[in-house]
Each structure stands twice: as structure tokens, then as C-alpha cells.
Image (cartoon, helix red, strand yellow):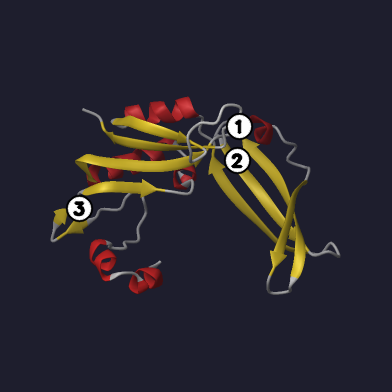
Amino acid sequence: MKAKLVQGPADLRRRVRLRRGDIRTVKLSSGGAPLQAELIIAPFNVVLHLYSRADFARFLNRVRQHLSPTGRFVFDFSVPRPGDLQRNPERRYAAGKVWDSISETELRAYERFEYDPLRQLLVVWTELQRPDGTVIATEPLAHRQIFPQEMMGILETAGFGVVRTWQNFAAPNPGEPLDSLAFECQPAG
């Protein structure tokens, strides 16, 4: 990210500051004063890596502390698919093919789904295989599963009002399955 910023236009480099920290606890400041932003974004399912209500509350508290009174908070998240939550955790499901540019080979991908309904946590294990069946990598991806109405309640409890939402990163298409939602929020009252 830093390398891309350095290569970017000078006006962009003056306006953007990169900071690294835990989204639940980070405290940003400028000249000793708390930093207030007009826009805070959390793209690419970042919020689904907050595995407990307490973690989510701490994160949203940080967002509110760093957001100006007129600022906007924008984020997206994948909407749970009930079929994925009910899959047999002992079974591998074909997930297509992936090109491996190192070995210049097409790999087969498989997924295994483990859902913990009490924690609302879905772990998808992705396995990559060579054509001869040799497994070369197995990686987990854990996402908390949050349904749209639950997200609305979480935001309201944290003091945010929803300005608008986007379905699948676009205007709703009748009949199109709901895959993801993006929210634009602002501090309430």
C-alpha cells in the first residue's frame, strides 16, 4: 500500500496518511489532538473479522471517536447463505480451478465448511490440489455471520444511523440473490 501511495500523485500523498493498528483499539491523532475524519471505510468484509459483540462494539466506538459529527462511515459485508451454514463439515465441495503461475499448472480448489451457530462463525477451509491429487495448500478463512437486521441493530446500539445501503455493490436487481450489503452510516443525533 505504501509503495502505491509513493507512486501516486503528489496531492494524494499530501492527503493520505497510512496508519497500522488494531481497529478495536487504535487511537489516531494529529498534532496531539484526536483525529477527526470525514470518511472512514472498512472494505472487503473487514467487519466479519470481529468475532464477538464486544469486539464489534469496541470497533464501532473507535469509528465514532474518529468520525467528525458530519462524517460518514462506509463498510460492506457478505450476507450469510443458509445453505453454506448447513453444509456437512466432513465433506469437501468442488470450488473450481485456479491457475498457479509458479508451477504453470491449473490447480483444483475444494472447500470445506465448518459453522459454529453459537458464535455465528463460519470457517471455510480452501484446499488446493495439483492434477495428480497432491494437496499443496490448505487455508482457513473465518467470517462472523451477521444477518442484515442484526447489523441494523448493532449499528443502532452503537449510535449510528444508516443513510443508505447497496445490495451486491449496485442498485437492487429483482430476482438477484443477495450476496453482500454495503452500508453508509453517520453518527445518530
Q: Amino acid at mark 1?
A: Pro
Q: Quadrant of the C terminus?
A: top left
Residue 24 in view of the camera: no
Dot placed on the residue nearer the N-terminal end, 1 or 2: 2
Residue 35's label in the rendered image is 3
- Image coordinates of residue 131 in percent, x first then y, are 83, 64
Q: Residue at x 49, y 43 (%)?
A: 48
How far apart, in angstroms, are the residues tagged by discs 1 and 3? 39 Å
How far apart, in angstroms, are the residues tagged by discs 3 and 2? 35 Å
Residue 177's label in the rendered image is 1
Q: Residues within 10 Å of mark 3 (few under 14, many from 20)?
A: some
Res. 71 image quadrant: top left
How far apart, in angstroms, are the residues tagged by discs 1 and 2? 20 Å
Q: Amino acid at mark 3?
A: Leu
Nearer to us of marks 3 and 2 is 3
- Image coordinates of residue 79 in percent, x first then y, are 54, 35
Picture layout, residue 146 above or below residue 90:
above
Residue 43 in view of the camera: yes
Nearer to us of marks 1 and 3 is 1
Q: Quadrant of the N terminus?
A: bottom left
Dot placed on the residue nearer the N-terminal end, 3 or 2: 3
- Image coordinates of residue 59 in percent, x first then y, are 35, 43
Residue 122's label in the rendered image is 2
Q: Amino acid at mark 2?
A: Leu
Q: Residues within 10 Å of mark 2 (few under 14, many from 20)?
A: many
Horizontal relation, residue 174 to residue 5: left or right: right
